Amino acid sequence: HGKEWILRDKDLSIAIAELNMKAGEKALDGCDHKTAYSYLGAALSLLPNDHWRNHYDLSLRLNFLMAGAAKSCCQYDEAVQILRGISGRTRCFEDKLPSYLLLSQILRTQGNGADAYNTCSFVLLQLGETIPESVAPEAAKTLVEDTLKMYEEVYDDDWLERKMEDKTLLTTLQFYSSIAYASFYCKSYSMVVYFICKSVQLSLRNGVCEHTPLSFLQFTGVVTKDDDAVLCYRIAKNAMSLQERFGMATQIPELYFQFYGRVAWRFEPLQVCADNLRRGFETGLSSGNNEMGLQCAFHAIKTAIVSGANLKSTLKEIDYYLHLLKTYKSAEVKN
């Protein structure tokens, strides 16, 4: 009865919707995703029928927040539906980009690697990038060598002072990282290497930003071999050193998964790697990045076993992670 009364007054309904949205944002900042989901859902229900036309910015912001909260609460189908709705109502391509990026992440979580790949591919093509049908292993090998050479030539104090600020380049870098993840499940290894090398070269040419460390870590994670392991470890350490500069707390699950799960175990104590992977797991679940948190968890188990951890304790930890895997419905981690 109260809601019907509020909806009769559009100004009042918008004001109360905004209050609920602010409460939802505060809950998200406090990692209380279920409360955020409730507040944001209430805010959406209070919007008038013409809200996209007459309250565009509010509608765009609120729907995107709701999609993120739904993802964190494992309501993946609802999140996908909201994000596709945003794409159909936005006024320009730039406004669609955050939704496309989040959509690609959710599709991966659902095990729809091909759909995630196609989403990223579509965006990158619109941004003027080239997406090959395939990449030969020899071409990928050459690309890795060229990227390593470029890194050695470019990476210095002067490059570190160059900040990438162009919004299009920043977006392109994010989608290259996302398509690299997606291509791992539906394309050849050479294609994965291609996209990661493209992202690294993009940053080396245009400067450093908050997305540079992940690109560099993805690169070292896939190209590390005995011949260049030391160089890759140095690149990875340099990437991790940028965390404080950009305040990348929300990226900890991805960064720790790539560094401690794929590179550092060759050079650092295994127990240190396992402990930091557990931290990545905890941060992932608290921040709503469930799938990457679970990736950290399973690499923590693998590292702990190799380090000689107590098997009885490890089995209990495995049971706990398997329970969470079922709860969070992550097809990406299962694969």
Image (cartoon, rainbow, N blue to C red):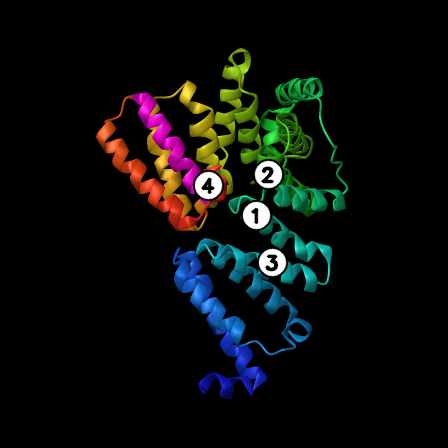
223 horizontally vs 237: left or right:
right
Position in image of residue 98 (x %, y %):
61, 53
Magenta-colored span: 291-307
Q: Which residue is mark 4?
A: 292
Image quadrant occupied by the N terminus: bottom left
Dot 2 alpha-carbon crowd within 10 angstroms: few under 14, some 14 to 19, many 20 or more: many
Position in image of residue 188 (x %, y %):
64, 28
Tag shown at residue 107: 1
Dot 3 alpha-carbon crowd within 10 angstroms: few under 14, some 14 to 19, many 20 or more: many
Q: Is residue 247 visible?
A: no
Could you tell which of marks 2 and 1 lies nearer the N-terminus? 1
Q: Quadrant of residue 214?
A: top right
Whole-number angstrom distance, CA of label 2 to CA of label 3: 18 Å
Q: Is residue 294 magenta?
A: yes
212 horizontally vs 2: left or right:
right
Q: Is residue 29 visible?
A: yes
Whole-number angstrom distance, CA of label 1 to CA of label 3: 11 Å
Could you tell which of marks 1 and 3 lies nearer the N-terminus? 3
Circle 3: residue type: Leu
Q: Which residue is mark 3?
A: 83
Q: Which residue is mark 2?
A: 182
Indicate the secondary structure of the residue bearing disc 1: helix
Residue at figure coordinates x 64%, y 41% from the top left: 117
Dot 4 alpha-carbon crowd within 10 angstroms: few under 14, some 14 to 19, many 20 or more: many
**Tag nearer the camera, 4 or 1:** 1
> Which secondary structure dominates the residues rendered in magenta?
helix
Whole-number angstrom distance, CA of label 4 to CA of label 2: 13 Å
Dot 1 alpha-carbon crowd within 10 angstroms: few under 14, some 14 to 19, many 20 or more: many
Could you tell which of marks 4 and 1 lies nearer the N-terminus? 1
Q: Is residue 182 above or below residue 303?
A: below
Circle 4: residue type: Met
- Residue at the top extreme of this rendering: 227
